[in-house]
Every structure is written in structure tokens, then in C-alpha cells.
Amino acid sequence: MKTNTLVIFSCFLVMSCANTVQQQSSAPKTAEAKAKPIKVQQPVRIEATKPTDIVDVLTVTSKVQVSMAYAGDSNFTGKAVPGYQANSCYLEKNAAQALAKVAQQAERLGYQLQLLDCYQPQRASNHFMLWLTNAADQSTKAEFYPNLEKNQLTPDYIAAHSGHSRASTVDLTLLRKNAAGQWQQLDMGGTYDLFDPVSHSDSNAINSQQKANRLLLKDLMQQQGFFPYAMEWWHFTLSNEKYSGTYFDFEISQPLN
């Protein structure tokens, strides 16, 4: 009787322990499943109509130079880009007004803003993605992506949907007058649209003066609510952009009144 009782009691303990181990081992799996929710891909909203609050920056401030790189052939594609029919900088009104304040402060310090890209039609991004697929065209490699291959440019430098298409992002640099009284670009340690690690905001491949120039631009922009993009020293987006979920695709056809 004692032997049978001991055996039965031992079996009960083994079964209880097994159940406890099974429950304990299943708990982390449940927690792990909760920690990794399924992400739902949100559809991209493309809007072809220009809203009335997207304005020409020159109607808000005259203290800037507008030099849209994609309106001509001095860009990484080597040609004028679809959607850029005029050398005009369009931005959502709040972004334009914030940029005007940056320009005003820059002027007080003896500088001027040079705007290199503002609103970018979605068709331009489509064109850039198509350009990436043409591996035979390497005509601009030496100037714009000397240390990378085309297939390495996306998504860090070229994306299927650019923040520029939301009309609150601007690419720019600073100008200062030289001894002859002519405006010239500050040395930022790398030219605009140079797709290379040297263009990263915190690059250590540039000298102290170049770092100071980048920091000056960054400080001026951040003071008015623009935040930088770490991969490109020239790229800034308004923090409270109005059209954060919309990508526009109307042409830049003329200066807006």
C-alpha cells in the first residue's frame, strides 16, 4: 500500500510539474506575439489638384535666391525633370512663412538663402525611380554618386515617394558675398545632391569650417521649426507639416501670385 501510494503521489508530482513547465513556456510566446503586432501598410494618397494654401515662396519673401536644380539639366539625371516647368519654389503657406523668418535671420547675419528644391511633383519621383533602373546611364556618376552604385541610392537618397511632394520640405544652402560683392555658396564640404557619406550631417570627413557652416544652416532652420535629414545636410522638413499624408502631383508651371 505504501509503495502504491508513493508511486501515485510521484506520478501526480511529475504531471503537475509538467503542466507548470508547459504553462511557463507558453507565457513568453504569448507575450512575444503581443510585442510584434502585424503592421498594416497604409495606402499612399496622391492628389493632382493644387490646394490654395500652397504658395510661391517669392510672394512671401524676397530675401531668397531660387535655383531649382531639377528645372534645368544641372542635376543627377543630367536633364530637366518632368513636372518642373518653371524655376519656382512652391511650399505650403506655413512652411513658406517659417522659411521667410529663416531668411530674415540669415540676412541679419550677412547671409542669404539659396533654395535648391521645394515642392516636388510625384511624377518627378517616378522619373527618378525609372532613372535608377537604367544601369547603362552613368553619365553623372563621377559628380553625384562616385562611391555608390545606382541600386544603392534608394531609399536613403532617392525614394518612390518624396517628402518634397508634401510641400513642406526644402533643400537649401547659404550664400555670402565675396570680396567682389557677389553672392557665393558657403563651403559645406560637399555639393548639393552628392549622394555620399560625406553629405551626412554629422560627417567627420569634412573640416571644422565646413562643419561650422552646416551647423549654422541647421541652427537657423531648427529655430523656425524645421528638422534636418541626417543623410543630407541640405534637406529640412517643417515639423508640423499640414499635408503629412498627401503627395501632390501638379506641375510647377509658373510663378504663383
Image: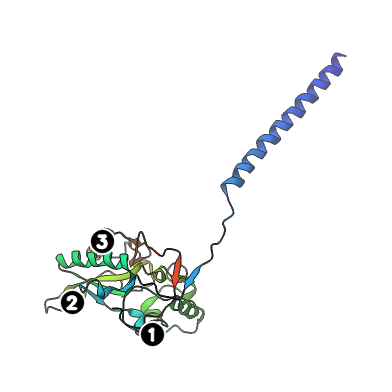
Left or right: residue 35 compared with residue 11:
left
Q: Quadrant of residue 179?
A: bottom left
Q: Which residue lies under the disc numbered 1?
A: 80
Question: Residue sitting at 51 percent across and 67 percent down?
Answer: 44
Amino acid bearing label 2:
Trp
**Secondary element type, mark 2:** strand
Color scheme of the displayed model? rainbow
Separation of residues labelled 1 and 2 (CA atoms): 25 Å
**Secondary element type, mark 1:** loop
Question: Residue sitting at 54 percent across and 65 percent down?
Answer: 43
Q: Which residue lies under the disc numbered 3?
A: 215
Separation of residues labelled 2 and 3 (CA atoms): 20 Å
Question: Residue sitting at 42 percent across and 78 percent down?
Answer: 250
Name the N-terminal-most of marks 1 and 2: 1
Pick the quarter of the image with the C terminus: bottom left
Left or right: residue 157 compared with residue 89:
right
Separation of residues labelled 1 and 3 (CA atoms): 31 Å
**Residue closer to the observer: 47 or 103:** 47
Name the N-terminal-most of marks 2 and 3: 2
- Are there few (<14), some (14-19), or many (20+) residues within 10 Å of tag 1? some
**Residue closer to the observer: 105 or 100:** 100
Q: Which residue lies under the disc numbered 2?
A: 183
Amino acid bearing label 3:
Leu
